[in-house]
Image (cartoon, helix red, strand yellow):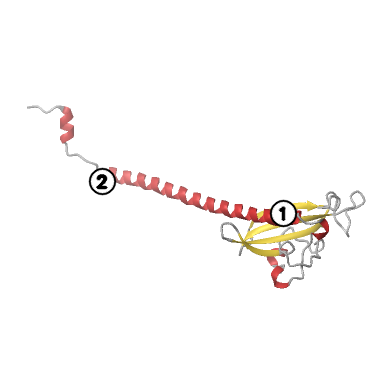
Amino acid sequence: MRIPPRLARLREEDGFTLIELTIVMAVLTIGILSLVAAYSSGYVAMKHATRVSSAQLLADSQMERFRALQYTSIALNTSCGATCSQDATYTADTAYSSTAQVTGCATQDQTCLSTQIKSGPDTNSYRIDTYITWSCLSGTYSAGSCGSSNPIPVKLVTVVVRQSGTTAVLVRQQSTFTSATGS
C-alpha cells in the first residue's frame, strides 16, 4: 500500500540541524537583548524626567516666594554663616556676580538664603542656589546705574537647582523685579 505524500511528510523523522538551531538561538538572543536595552534606557529617561520635574517644582516654589515680596525686601543674607555659605559651586555659576550682588536681608527666612538643601516630592535631596544681582533691562549695569537712557536698575533673581552632591544643573529659572511696579 502506498502512503499519500502528505502523511509521508508527517512520518519523517527529520528535525532541525544544529546550524539551524544555532541561528534561531542567535536571532532570539538579539531580540531579547534589544528589549532589555530599550527597557533600561526607558527607565533611565523616566528617572531623569522625575528629577527634572521635582527640581522645577522646587525652583517654582522658591521664585514664588520672591514674587510675594515687596521690591525693597528682595535681597540675600550673606552674613548667615554656615547655613548659606557661598562655596565654589555657588561662585562658579554664571549667575554669580560679586560686584552686582544684592544683599541686605537680615532674616534667616529661606527666601533670603543663597544656598539651601531641600527634599523634593520624589524624596531626593536637591540643592537650591539663589542669586540676586542688579541688572538692566537695556544697557549695562555699572556703579549703581544702567546709563542715562535707562536709569532704573532691576533686580535679576536666578534660581538654580542641582541634585544634592553634584554640580550639574537640573533647572535654571530667572525673573526680573523692578521698583517701577513695586514687585
Which residue sits at x=75%, y=52%?
175
Which residue sits at x=39%, y=45%?
31
* Of the pair 114 and 180, the residue shown nearer to us: 180
Which residue sits at x=85%, y=56%?
141
What secondary structure is marked by label 1?
helix
* Of the pair 51 and 110, the residue shown nearer to us: 110
* Cα–Cα span, label 1 and label 2: 69 Å
Q: Which residue is mark 2?
A: 18
- Residue 38: image location, x then y, percent: 46, 47
Residue 64 tag number:
1
- The mark that comes first in sequence, 1 or 2, is 2
- Residue 167: image location, x then y, percent: 64, 61
* Of the pair 167 and 21, the residue shown nearer to us: 167
Determine crowd level at label 2: few under 14, some 14-19, many 20+ residues with C-alpha closer than 10 A.
Answer: few
The answer to whether 176 appears left or right of 57 in the picture is: right
Query: Given this view, does label 1 or label 2 mark the residue nearer the observer?
Result: 1
Relative height, residue 17 to residue 43 (above, below): above
> Splitting the image into 4 quarters, where does residue 83 fall?
bottom right
Q: Amino acid at mark 2?
A: Leu
What secondary structure is marked by label 2?
helix
Residue furthest to the right: 148
Relative height, residue 105 to residue 10 (above, below): below
- Residue 147: image location, x then y, percent: 90, 53
Determine crowd level at label 1: few under 14, some 14-19, many 20+ residues with C-alpha closer than 10 A.
Answer: few
- Residue 74: image location, x then y, percent: 79, 59
Q: Amino acid at mark 1?
A: Glu
